[in-house]
Amino acid sequence: MSVWWKSFLDRLPVYIFPAFLVVIEWILRSISSLDTQTFIGPTLAAVGASYLVPLTIDKPLTQEKQKKFPQVIIDEFEMLRGKGISVRTESEQHFIQFCWVCVLVFTGTWALSLYLSAKFPHNLLWIAPASYYPGIVNYFGGIVLCEIREGVL
């Protein structure tokens, strides 16, 4: 398998996941008689969950990160890259695994938001409809994880 094809297959969930959520939401909107305001929470939840999918792709080692390794290891990295093998740190591997778990959890939170918007469309919890809160949690949770990835890994 070519390096381009493998890279494309790694990126494929990034392109499919948001479309999958939109199709499911569209189906639910078309079979319900709810107003569109009830879907603000699920839409925010879908966006937050979609932020996570790109975080599951390897981030290449930068020159700055490579300076932390002995020259022998850096030479090995270059040899492996030349053969099309990606190299990642252990902390990045753990972060990617954590992000996959979060994708599942955020997808469940999105489903909760859909349920709340369909079953209890106008029930207020504090100052907003109950379906908004799972969406807000997903949205800002996705942003926080993106920022962690940029700052830590």
Image (tube, rainbow, N blue to C red):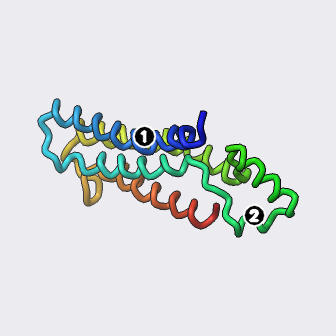
From the top left corner, tell me how far across and down residue 116 is, in percent.
29, 41
Q: CA distance from mark 2 to mark 1?
A: 35 Å
| Residue reaching furthest to the top | 31
Nearest to the eye among marks 2 and 1: give it: 2
**Of the image marks 2 and 1, the number of the one nearer the N terminus:** 2
Give the residue at x 85% y 63%.
71
Q: In x, y percent, where is residue 54?
A: 49, 50
Q: Position of residue 119 (x, y in %)?
A: 24, 36
- The amino acid type found where label 1 is placed reads Thr
Name the residue carrying label 2. 66
Q: Report crowding for label 1: few under 14, some 14 to 19, many 20 or more residues within 10 A (C-alpha).
A: some
Dividing the image into 4 quarters, which one contains the C terminus?
bottom right
Q: Residue at x 19, y 37 (%)?
A: 29
Question: Residue 9: horizontal and vertical position, in percent?
Answer: 51, 38
Secondary structure of residue under mark 2: helix
> Can you see residue 101?
no
- Residue 107 is marked as 1
Q: How many marks?
A: 2
**Who is closer to the viewer here, 77 or 96?**
77
- Within 10 angstroms of label 2, few (less than 14), some, or many (20 or more) residues? few
Q: Residue at x 70, y 69 (%)?
A: 64
Q: Residue at x 32, y 52 (%)?
A: 44
Q: Name the residue type under label 2.
A: Gln
In the figure, 2 relative to 95: above or below? above
Position of 86 compared to 8: left or right? right
Q: Which mark is residue 33?
A: none
User: Foreground residue, 12 or 30?
Assistant: 12
